[in-house]
Amino acid sequence: MKATTLITLATLAFSSSIPLPAHGKPTHPNVLVILTDDQGWGDLSLNGNTNLQTPNIDSLAHEGAMFDRFYVCAVCAPTRAEFLTGRYYPRTGVRGVSTGEERLNIDETTIADTFKAAGYTTGAFGKWHNGSQHPYHPNARGFQEYVGFTSGHWGHYFDPVLEHNGELFNAEGYITDYFTTRAIDFIKENKDQPFFCYVPYCTPHSPMQVPDEFFDKFSERPLEMRNREPEREQEAHLRAALAMCENIDHNVGRLLETLQNENLSDNTIVLFFTDNGPNGVRWNGGMKGRKGSIDEGGIRVPLLVRWPGHIKPGTDVKHIAGAIDLLPTLADLAGIPMISQKPLDGLSLKPLLLEKDPDWQSRPILSYRGGKKGAGPQFSVRNQKYRLDPTGALFDINADPGQYKDIAADHPDVTAKLTKIANKFKKEIAADITEDDRPYSVGHSETTPLPARDGINHGGIERSNRAPNDSFFTNWTSTDDKITWNIEVAEPGDYEATIYYTCADENTGAEINLTFQNETLPFTITEAHDPPLRGEESDRSDRGSESFVKDWKVHPVGTIHLNKTQGDITLQATKIPGEAAIDIRYLMLKKVD
């Protein structure tokens, strides 16, 4: 099979190895995809890390295939976009990880759309991170069942507030354990029909929280494997991350055991990968970079694929591959047609998985990282042997996997070729990486959440943490202050407005207006609700970009008419009798029949 940098779905032919039973109808395999968050290539005992043990994840490689050099993106939402679409993420509308930049354009066709169209039952259980409001929500992107959170960060992993198909609820237990339980329920309920089960865990992403039974093992244990810059390691964070990885392995074991107990193992493709390099300085095979980098250490992650009776145990794939390849690969293995009309960047890896000596011509994998704080965008290119890094330095990864020696001057032809590829990609996506000005959609579903993450604070109002994800608005001390959300109303009509708030007793009586266009809805906060912040009591190390959380009180505001138009919906106080008005987590809008 000849590989090219870009393929068109209409020209992609699939050869199915699906067995035909006596009645002549194909028996499509189930698919279980497990994605972890901020777990690096080195966070598996499979790859030589003796600091931890991950036997269940390792077993997927022993019983199936392991890709030696598999590449994703530098951060979370972009990797998810590439997995969902088979396309480089700048083409998909995703520009970042918060405040709407994580949204996948509504004209993109997802892997769930593809499997659902083929008759599969689809479910996702975990961190979505590609849009919160319909039509960006997972239930609008092909997933019939969804349990999890749609944001990029979550502030507390024990007894968390999650959502089930758009409805918030209080879950019980540790978040990774809970996602696994719901995925197991889904598998059992759909064992008699083909299912596509996506389990995007949110760990070992911070906050660094993990049950005692896993952390106690690492609290004082000597750690032999160290980062190439050991002086930069943060011991508490490192130990918590290792414990969280072992908890993930425990839960992967629960999923595999369920498949075995339900007699589903032989007819289920299990795929495991992670979304970027490690979220801390820890052992990662001596590679350069970590999460946020487009060097090897930031984007090389594990990819393990098991399909008993089809993929030979112990298959070791040396050809480079990436997240863009997973959609065409899984569709090809399952023997189902593609339904998107957009060109893919990815290729089906089926020949590498099923053929002993595949006719395969490797192609380059491109990596992009958006600019921050005035810095321009970064591009990196990897072919089978070399990496051209964002500075123009060239490294022979086969001979120098740690990227220590720049050999660009010694290989000007290779440098020029890879630079040309990077420049061509830069030109292709130039129109797609402009500032994100998309409004938040209202009215595509019965209830539309407008979390603080997506709002803009004006005046003295502050976020509870510098990172918008899972934050709330606080320090509302002046009637000149306001909060706005830029929205586009898809269906005009009356909407019931509700806020999730907290308020100290001495601050009750605040009078606030909710305004959109020429419509104003006044309301008054008459009940105090002042719970403590939660989360710190479970942290194993200092948290960084996640807000602490609170138990929020739900307050019905009233009914407001929204015209079919775009504009700012605004909350502004007209009277603040105490030192402050309220802290606010959500504004909810529900269509009135």
Image: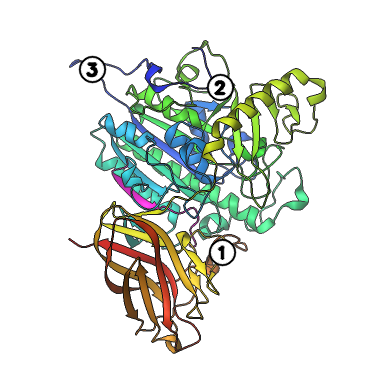
Say what amino acid the circle numbered 3 marks.
Answer: Pro
Q: Nearer the viewer, residue 18 or 433?
A: 433
Q: Secondary structure at mark 1?
A: loop
Task: Tell me, yes or no, if residue 263 can be seen here.
Answer: no
Q: Report which quarter residue 384 is drawn in.
A: top right
Task: Tell me, yes or no, if residue 561 can be seen here.
Answer: yes
| Residue ID for mark 2 | 317
Q: Which mark is residue 504?
A: none
Q: Which mark is residue 21?
A: 3
| Residue ID for mark 1 | 539
Q: First in sequence: mark 3 or mark 1?
A: 3
Report the span colored magenta: 143-156
Q: Position of residue 503 (x, y in %)?
A: 43, 80
Say what amino acid the circle numbered 2 marks.
Answer: Val
Q: Give the CA distance from mark 3 to mark 1.
A: 53 Å
Q: Nearer the viewer, residue 259 or 6?
A: 6
Q: First in sequence: mark 2 or mark 3?
A: 3
Q: Give the CA distance from mark 1 to mark 2.
A: 39 Å
Q: First in sequence: mark 1 or mark 2?
A: 2
Residue in the image at 80% along x and 30% along y: 405
